[in-house]
Amino acid sequence: MSRFRLYPTPVQHAALLKQCEHARYVWNLALEQWSLWTRDKRATPGYGDQARQLTDARAAFAWLRAGSQTVQQQALRDFDRAAKSFYTGTHRRPTWRRAGVHEGFRIVGGQATRVVKLNRKWAAVNVPKVGWVRFRLSRAVPEARSYRVTCDRSSRWHIAFAAIPVPIPAPGRGEVVGVDRGVAVSAALSTGELLICPGLSQTEHARLKHLQRRLARRRRGSNRRRRVKAAIAKLYARAVDRRKDWVETTSTGLARRFDLIRVEDLRVARLTRRPKAKPDPQQPDRYLPNHRRAKAGLNRGILANG
């Protein structure tokens, strides 16, 4: 995936959010149909049946018809692929998509994937029902048949073109390195190098604590609470960007320096599970301490190291 930063106008921003809403609605409907299946019922509708149902729904509801049929059909295709991947055991079970968290949609093929270069720094891509949206040319745009438009929690739009990256050639010297992952030290190499993933600075940590205290005092649903949440999201997005850049730079550097890289087979999802509650045998309505606050801090440390 080659990802670029999108810069839509306010009108395009609203139209893109509406497309995300339609894609999320169609995905959740398909997931609901799939989840209602039991052994005493016949098979749930596949992509073909759901596409015909979508056509009937668009004819009945004007708000759904106002969206792009390409986006909505692609949401059904994505769900069908996700369900098949779950049955083959390669991916997890499909989950519900929530507003503000899963904002995005995918476009495949046709004139929609056409990109026009405006100048040395800017280009534009054609999004159905939205028009030409500008994005920053931070690198060369690859040849791709599909792209995905997403919006993160700090309201930043991105476009990712689905293209297979060029493989990095090995140096051919037969060198081997072992990588030990940790919390205090993100990656310790067998060569003696210690690599630490960058995060928020001390000033940014102080501002984050200040904003979290302000958030606790804001009334739910108020505009002030919404603005504080947006400021917190920007800080977290800054940390995520630094972590992603560090991961990509470190992994690419190791691939260029060594022919064989040995890493731990870490199950991060299991490592970061919350501790189970421990019922008190002496008092049925009470629980024993399970050190959940310490485990939550450890989980944050594990995830913050990429």
Image: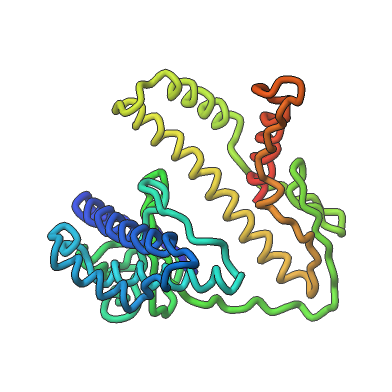
Q: Is residue 136 visible?
A: no
Q: Residue 207 placed where, x, y %?
A: 51, 27
Q: Residue 134 placed where, x, y %?
A: 29, 62
Residue drawn at (71%, 20%) of the image: 283
Q: Residue 259 placed where, x, y %?
A: 79, 75
Q: In which image quadrant can residue 37 be found?
A: bottom left
Query: Is residue 260 toward the left or the right of residue 169 in the image?
Result: right
Out of 117 and 47, give the one closest to the viewer: 47
Out of 248 and 306, give the one closest to the viewer: 306
In the picture shown, does residue 280 fall above or below 32? above
In the picture shown, does residue 205 fall above or below 27? above
Farthest residue, direction top: 217
Query: Is residue 155 toward the left or the right of residue 58 in the image?
Result: right
Q: Residue 271 placed where, x, y %?
A: 71, 48
* Total tally of numbered discs in the picture: 0
Out of 216 and 72, give the one closest to the viewer: 72
**Colouring scheme, one of rainbow, by chain, secondary structure, one colour:** rainbow
Farthest residue, direction front: 40
Q: Is residue 201 visible?
A: yes
Q: In which image quadrant can residue 144 be found?
A: bottom left
In the picture shown, does residue 111 fall above or below 235? below
Query: Is residue 304 toward the left or the right of residue 119 in the image?
Result: right
Residue drawn at (42%, 64%) of the image: 34
Query: Is residue 64 toward the left or the right of residue 23 in the image?
Result: left
Residue drawn at (36%, 27%) of the image: 225
Q: In which image quadrant can residue 138 be found?
A: bottom left
